[in-house]
Structures are given as structure tokens and as C-alpha cells.
Amino acid sequence: MPDRSKASGSRRGSADSVARMSELGHLQPQAIDMEEAVIGACLIEKDAFGQVSDYLKPESFYDTRHQHIFRAIQSLAAENKPVDILTVTEQLRKIGKIDDAGGPLYVTELSSKVLSSAHIEYHAHVVAEKALARQLISYTSDIQKSAFDEGEDINELMQTAEGRLFELSKTNMKKDFTQINPVIKEAYAMLEKAAARKDGLSGLTSGFVRLDKMTSGWQNSDLVIIAARPAMGKTAFVLSMAKNMAVDNRIPVAMFSLEMSNVQLVNRLIVNVCEIEGEKIKSGQLAPFEWAQLDYKIKDLYDAPFYVDDTPSLSVFELRTKARRLVRDYGVKIIIIDYLQLMNASGMSYNSRQEEVSTISRSLKGLAKELDIPIIALSQLNRSVENRVGSDPNDPDSKRPQLSDLRESGAIEQDADMVCFIHRPEYYKVLRDKDNNSTKDMAEIIIAKHRNGAVGDVKLRFKGKFARFSNMEDEQGDAFVDMGETIQPSNSNGVSYDGGDDKMEAFNNLTADMAPDDNEPPF
């Protein structure tokens, strides 16, 4: 009879050895038997490779012999050639890897490891998970070594670590197909929700009536690029929009300002809301009635769901982390970035700035889809707008921006769901539009690309001294735009009129409406 005590002792000794090995070091995550099952199934059934090709690559295998064999299978499949023991062996000979793959005998042995490909997808998922675990170990090991190096810049190391993890997650993130029925139900539910709204919008309102009518509001998962040359009012436009959304409609908004500090940004918002000139806010030289106006109107800004971040040279990976938290913890419905060209994608290597900007724009589009919210990114235009000269220097269209004017990368146009330009003809000394209307204080929002809707132009009012865009109908005094007259404060109502007698009645009606109520502040 066999000596059971010796056998038992042998098993205990083996277990003790494994335990001892785990104390001394760690074995790399691996599943050799699963790897053999996957390759064996690919060798005996012609459709097996197609079931695993989406998420397995040669580097996914721990055993180098399996890497060479799977690469040979991959090459044959790419050329639409049959995959079996003979063809794979011949392919390995052709590329000079037959010995590295264990020889013809080993390839033959693998085909006998399984009877069918019935469980190949499960086996492949295990192999892929082990490969991902090895990659994480490698990445964290490199980061650990760098962290021990006192000469390393910690902030740069953080961005590198985040960049590498982001790259890894993007490479391994696979989304399966969806049968159309649940998607139809979701689309129908969205349609019913939009129909129930009185404003007829299916997305978030911008507060600009004509713009909302053309876009149906900012749509979830859309990347919207708003581009213009410097001094056109990009920041003023998104701040006006943020005020409309967060202050007037209580929609949570987050804004990442890479150009201005939080205080500068809020100062411009105060100028916008309180209607006090920016220079006076900056210098603090306010008249007594302006202090009263400030105290009265600034109350609208308190407790508004408006979140600002002024991290300079923000990386797309930092943005991803912060955006997730803003959506999860604060219910943010839209994110604004001012502006795209000041961002970076550190942690990865690029051959050119164009490649980096392409990565940033693709990442922003991916983030919008992941969080299911609109992301609005401001962008600069190149100098070609300034240098463009038409046959007529007074032609209002000669300086209109085009999609080809987007700066640094064509990928911005490609990735964006919508591209809008801000154009102010008055800036270029064009005082009349094509219909001979005055362009004073007028701005055009040009929708040049709209993946899910119409393109066209929307006219807004722009008040430079208040850094504010508004609806054409909102500004008091619109009735006098075509009169070419001025309204200046002087009388007890705070206004006087310098126009003709034939327009006095309309002016008196307006000033009567503007007269202060006894119980309200005089502004």
C-alpha cells in the first residue's frame, strides 16, 4: 500500500513551497491553461479567431510561444487564409519563428487541448484580464521608481501617471453592440420629454432665443466648438450664456478657465450682471448709485450653481477626473472650457502640436459621450481671417471665419458635433451689413457645422463695456436703433432725449416705464 503519510507530507510540502514563494515575491498574473485553450480552439475551428480578435492581441499572452503562434494566426486571418495546424506551422516557418513557437510538435499538441471553441470567449476574457493586470503592475512599478527619485517633479509625475492610465483604459475599453429595440425606446422617451416642454427644446437652453431655436438647445454628449479671433468676445459669450443658465434657469454649469483667474472671471460676471463698466470694477471707482446698483444686483449671483476652476495648463486627464466629480457630486449639466489650445495632453509623446490637439479634441468628445452632457470648448482661429482681403474692403463677408480657419488641427472640426464662430463686423470697421442695416453693437453667431441640425447665422446684441451678449429683443432702446439717435441721462427719470419731435411720444412712453418705483432702488 502506498505510504499516505508521505503523500500527505508531499502535498503539504508543495503548499508550503508556494506559500514561501508568495512571501518572497510575486508571480506575474497569468493563465497558461486558458491561453492554450484559446489558441487550440483557433487551430481547430475556422470562426474561433473572429470571436476573440476584438480584445486579444499577441501581447495579451504571457507565454512567448503563444505570442508567436497567435501573431501567425492573426496574419493568416488578415489575408483571408485558412487557419489550421498546417497553415500556422507554415506561416511560422515563413517568418522564422517556428523554433521560438516551440516547434511543429508543440503547435500540434495545442490543437489537442480542446475539443471545440464552445467556451473560447470566456477563456479569452480571462487571458485579457491577466494581460491588463500585468500592464498595471508594469505602469505602477515605473511610477513607484520615479516617485522614489527626489529629482522628479511630482506634479509632472502625477500627470504622466494619469496619462498612462488613461491611455491604458482607452485601449482596453470595449463597448458591445446593442440591439435596436431599447435604443428606440430611449429615443421615443426623449421625444416625449421634449414635446412636454413649453419651449420646444430637447436640450439645455443657452438663454439666447434664436440660437436655441436653431439648435434645439445644447444636446447631451455633443462637443461644441465656439471659435473666434482674439477680442471677438469668446469669453464674454460663454459667460453671458453661463449667467443665463446658472443664474436665470438654475442649471448647474462648470467652467474651466485656463486664461483667467477665478477672481478675474467672476469680476467679468459681475460686470455682466450688474451692468457696471469693467474699468470701474477693476479700479473700484464707483459712484454712489453704482455701489447701490452693485449691492442690489450682485445678490443674483450668490448660491448660483456655477463652478469655476482656473488651473493653468490643464491636462485633458485632470479635466476628466474633475469633470466626473462635478457631474457625480454637484449634478453639473454642462462644461465650458476656455480655451482648447491652452490645454495639454501630457503623459504621452507626440511628434507635433497638431497630434496633441487632435488627442485633446478626441478626448473631449469621448468625455462628453461618457458623461452624457454637452461640452463647450472655446478655440482660437488662425491669422488667415485677418489677412483675407475681398474685392471690396467694405464687404461685410470678407472677414467672416470659415472652418478652414480653425487653429492647429483639422481634428477639431472632425470631432466636433457643432462648430460656431463669433463674428463682429463692427470690429473690422464694417458699419453696414448686406441689407444696409447698422452693425453697431451687433454680433453674429455663425453655425458652420451642425452634425444633427441646420447651419445658419444668429444675430445677438453685444455690449462691450458690459462684456455681455444678449437677445436682440432684450436691450432697452432697441426701438431707437434705426433712429440713429442717442439717449443720455439728465432729468429726474435719469434719461433725456435728443431726437426729433415726431419720435418724442415713443420716447416718453419708454421713459415712463423706466421711472423708478417708490419701493425699489432707482436703477
Image (cartoon, rainbow, N blue to C red):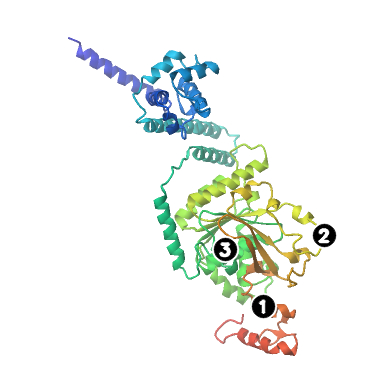
User: Do we see residue 518 in this rendering?
Assistant: yes
Q: In terms of sequence position, does the residue under pointer 2 or pointer 3 come before the other?
A: 3
Q: In terms of sequence position, does the residue under pointer 3 or pointer 1 come before the other?
A: 3
What residue would you read off at disc 2?
391
Quadrant holding the N terminus = top left
Residue 77 versus residue 14 in the image, above or below: below
What residue would you read off at disc 1?
478
Q: Secondary structure at mark 1?
A: helix
Q: Which mark is residue 242?
A: 3
C-alpha span from label 2 to label 3: 39 Å
Q: Secondary structure at mark 3?
A: helix
Q: Residue at x 55, y 40 (%)?
A: 163
Q: Nearer the viewer, residue 344 or 293?
A: 344
Q: Residue at x 49, y 58 (%)?
A: 332
Q: Residue at x 67, y 65 (%)?
A: 444
Q: Nearer the viewer, residue 498 or 109?
A: 109
Q: In terms of sequence position, does the residue under pointer 1 or pointer 2 come before the other?
A: 2
Give the residue type at disc 2: Ser
